[in-house]
Amino acid sequence: MRTPPNERLTSDIDGPGLPAAAGSERRCILTGATSARDDLLRLAISPDGLVLPDAGAKAPGRGAWIGVTRAALETALADGQLKKALMRAFKGAPLTIPEDLAHKAEAALARHLGDRLGLELRSGNIVMGSARIEEQARSGRIAVLLHASDSSEDGRRKLDQAWRVGTDAEGSGLRGQTLPLDRTALSVALGRDNVVHLGVAGHPGDMRAANRVLQAVSRLVHYAGNDRASETNETGRDTSGHADRPQGRAANIDEYVKD
């Protein structure tokens, strides 16, 4: 859809044919906060005014950006704040906002993460199987450690310890990321049976695959309200600053495959 000639594009909306510059920023239409484009979720506006999540930020037409949690988006939907923000951004253009947009947004982010994991698996960057993960973690070849939401505490603890050894972080309390996705969701995403834990291969000199996965993980975890768990920098140490936040809801794949 073409942008009307009297509608100025700002950092909180965009239009077709505008490639994102490296490190570009966008403004959340709900909070007004400016963040890196890759940290936000794009809402695409179809030619007939339907508002839908665009986790890959590739859909044609105009779009707006949000950086809030699911709970905050649900509140903004209920009290009309999202509708008002979108109408301000698009100069009162007719819009249709689905009642289940908050759910659709989480589903889109989950699918985006699943797609990313699938791509990295095909590139040879995903390590699966507890024994293999433990061996590679201890030898310093795992850059990111991920656990399903329904993984056992004992299983997480064993692999977390191996990861701390491999990253010279013993005694630090470093833990892998517990995802808001269960083992069924991870198994479907990766086309394997019973994926409970997985590692992303890498080392301090090559964090490219790890950073790609972490970007997709962090958006889903933040949106789900589960950013308590560790995020890692190139040294493998906790950089989240949210170690005491409570866990959010754990999502089942059934919520995602039907959208």
Image: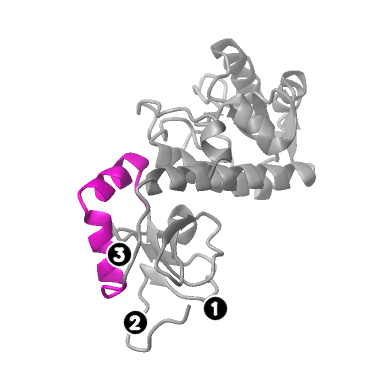
Q: Nearer the viewer, mark 3 or mark 2?
A: 3
Q: Residue at x 46, y 43 (%)?
A: 106
Provide the residue span drawn in magenta. Answer: 67-93
Q: Earlier in the sequence, mark 2 or mark 1?
A: 2
The circle drawn on residue 86 is 3
User: Which residue extends farthest top?
Assistant: 154
Q: Residue furthest left?
A: 79
Whole-percent x, y for residue 101 in the image: 39, 49
Asked if residue 31 shows in the view, the reply is no
Q: Which mark is residue 8?
A: 2
What's the CA distance linking mark 2 and mark 1? 15 Å
From the viewer's perspective, tell me whether residue 80 is left or right of residue 62.
left
Q: Which mark is residue 17?
A: 1
Residue at 50% x, 64% y: name it. 23
Instruction: Indicate which disc, 1 or 3, sits on the residue closer to the N terminus.
Output: 1
- Residue 173, given in percent of the width and then of the height, sits at 49, 22
| Residue 122 placement, left or right of 189 | right
Residue 247 falls in which quadrant of the image?
Answer: top left
- Give the residue type that dot 2 points to: Arg
Among the two numbered marks 3 and 2 on one chain, the one whose residue lies closer to the N terminus: 2
The residue under the point 56% across, 64% down is 58
Nearest the eye: 168 or 212:
212
